[in-house]
Amino acid sequence: MLRNMTIRKRILTILTIVYLISMVLAVGGGYYVLRQDTIREAEEKTQLFSAAMSASQQYLASQIRPKVLEQLPEIYFPEATVGIVMLTEVSKMIQENYPEYIFRIASPNSLNPANNSDAFESKTIDAFDMGDSDQWRGFIERDGKNFYAIATPMIAAEGCIWCHDTPERAHPDMVARYGKSSGYGYVAGDVVGGRFIYVPVEVALQQARLKLAYFTGGFSVFFLLALVVVDRIIVRSVVKPIENIVSVADDISRGKMDREFEAQGNDEIKTLVDAFKRMKVSLAKAMDILSR
Ligand code: HEC
């Protein structure tokens, strides 16, 4: 196909192909890098969030709960003894300033219906239960929004059982608050739920796409300018001089010996013109001899 084209078209076609290939590579590579960047950022945020949550849970378990249980053994005071109650309350406060961040402790068998796992959470908890993995991370859509999520299993320990075994064994105030229907039957060692942290990535991904669009626009304008400049150079230094040589050679072949081959510069065209000049001199001599 290229062989039947003029030199000008051939070069412009090759440049356009180079542009298209480099565009695909640059946009593909750029999107990959920006997406990785977005994931890394989301991961850092989720891990920070997760670490803050774990630290406060540990603080409650090691510093507050033993004292409370020692001082008030009979009183049901979940705000100071149940890590999950504290975390749920703390995350509500965080959400006042960062409404888009979501922290959930979910279970298919929950005391509080608000903690009921949704389809994605149940599936993830099931996978933890099967022993498939001990962490899930990735993108997930929630209420039409894109989130980066990290999920870890919650495993029942001996210390959990007195509240989560049977309604008879649990504190009556707790049973009065949550009822008897669900949230019980825990066995130590079982996966009983999962901790899910969702960090929104829609905004970051949108920014990444915008950056890529700017880059694509800039790259295209630059390439278009380069294409125009290269085209001008081809026309000036190749197409025009060759057209000129053709027209002069045409005239000379029809006997107009007053036409002269001309070339500017010192390139291959000049060499060609010099050769044609010598040929014209030889031709003139030959015709001279013939006409005698
Ligand atoms: C002092 C009683 C108590 C202890 C001990 C306790 N929990 Fe709970 N747990 C609760 C209460 C109360 C809730 C409901 C919190 C709410 O309203 O969000 C709850 C909620 C949960 C939930 C969320 C689903 C649901 O039932 O609403 C999970 C999962 C859970 N607990 C697991 C555990 C694990 C694992 C342990 C041991 C490490 C543990 N719990 C120890 C009282 C307890």
Image (tube, rainbow, N blue to C red):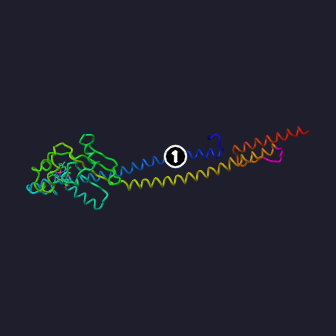
Asked if the stretch drawn in magenta spans residue 93, the answer is no
The one of 135 and 176 positioned closer to us in this rendering? 176
The one of 169 and 22 positioned closer to us in this rendering? 169
Seen in the image, is 46 located left or right of residue 163? right
Quarter of the C terminus within the rendering: top right
Residue found 30% across the figure and 56% down from its top: 101
Check disc 1 and report its element: helix, strand or loop.
helix
Q: What's the magenta bit mostly, secondary-structure-wise?
A: loop
Seen in the image, is 168 located left or right of residue 28? left
So how many labels did they put on this image?
A: 1
The one of 200 and 62 positioned closer to us in this rendering? 200
Residue found 25% across the figure and 50% down from its top: 117
The residue to which callout 1 is attached is 22
User: Going by the picture, which residue comes out furthest to the right?
Assistant: 292
Seen in the image, is 22 located left or right of residue 208? right
| Callout 1 amino acid | Ser
Read off the magenta span: 254-260
Q: Would you identify the image quadrant in which residue 274 lies?
A: top right
Residue found 16% across the figure and 51% down from its top: 181
Mark 1 is surrounded, within 10 Å at the Cα level, by few (under 14), some (14 to 19) or many (20 or more) other residues, namely few
User: Going by the picture, which residue comes out furthest to the left?
Assistant: 74
Quarter of the N terminus within the rendering: top right
Q: Would you identify the image quadrant in which residue 276 lies?
A: top right
Asked if the stretch drawn in magenta spans residue 258, the answer is yes
Q: Give the image location of residue 248, x and y in percent.
A: 78, 46
Q: Give the image location of residue 245, x and y in percent.
A: 75, 45
Seen in the image, is 121 located left or right of residue 260? left
Q: Give the image location of residue 277, x and y in percent.
A: 78, 43
Vertical relation: 97 (above or below) 58: below
Q: Give the image location of residue 160, x and y in percent.
A: 15, 48
